[in-house]
Amino acid sequence: MKKSGSAIFLMEFIVVILSFSLSVTITLQLFVSAYQKGERSEEISVALLHAQNIAEQIKAFGSDALTYGGWVKEHTADGTRRFQLVFDDGFTAKIVFEKFSASRLFGVVRVYPPGADSGGGADEALCSLNLSRYVPKDTGGGL
């Protein structure tokens, strides 16, 4: 049985349309993925700038950076000192001072994205920086 040329042309045309649809779908997924990664990268960059600024302020001013910087102190039962600050752009920073000694101050600053529930978990944070500062005994400098 002979097939007409138009039937073969239609089948070939359908295959071309399906392959074009598949390539458009894959291309759109790649663009959406690239956009999402770009947005995430921008959030991480801003969070890292906030964390670096906080670390520099603590390095320069010690506990005064937290006293006068608008930080809110959270009281905990275990005696760790926690501070929280919400920036104008919606990012939230939390500092947890985990270890203390007479001459050194140790802690971690974590920055969370806008709108995130910043319950304090390290997994949710965009970035995390360790803090360490030498505090001379005769200057006070404690928290």
Image (cartoon, helix red, strand yellow):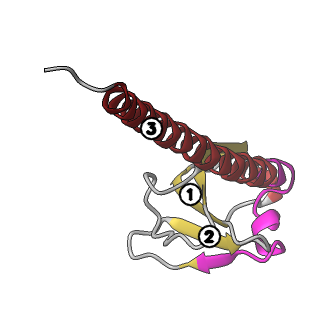
The mark found on residue 83 in the picture is 2
Stretch in magenta: 56-73
What crowding class fits label 2: few (fewer than 14 Cα within 10 Å), some (14-19), or many (20 or more)? Answer: some
Under tag 3, what secondary structure? Answer: helix
**Viewer-closest of 86 and 56:** 86
Helix or strand or loop: what does disc 2 sit on?
strand
| Residue 72 on image: x %, y % | 66, 79
The answer to whether residue 105 is visible is no
In the rendered structure, which disc, 1 or 2, sits on the residue that comes first in sequence? 2
Q: For mark 1, does the 10 Å Cα neighbourhood hold few (<14), some (14 to 19), or many (20 or more) residues?
A: many
Q: Amino acid at mark 2?
A: Phe
Whether the magenta-drawn stretch holds residue 74 is answered as no
Q: Are marks 1 and 2 in contact (CB under 8 Å)?
A: no
Q: CA distance from mark 3 to mark 1?
A: 61 Å
Q: Earlier in the sequence, mark 3 or mark 2?
A: 3
Q: Is residue 12 left or right of residue 112?
A: left
Residue toward you, 69 or 125 = 125
Q: Position of residue 17 (x, y in %)?
A: 45, 38
Kindly report the distance in space between the C-alpha atoms of the residues bearing marks 3 and 2. Answer: 59 Å
Amino acid, disc 3:
Ile
Q: Quadrant of the C terminus?
A: bottom right
Identify the residue under disc 1: 97
Q: Is residue 44 above or below residue 116?
A: above
List x then y, in percent, for residue 61.
85, 56
Say which of 113 and 119 sits in front. Answer: 113
| CB within 8 Å, label 3 to label 2 | no
Kindly identify which residue carries mark 3. 17
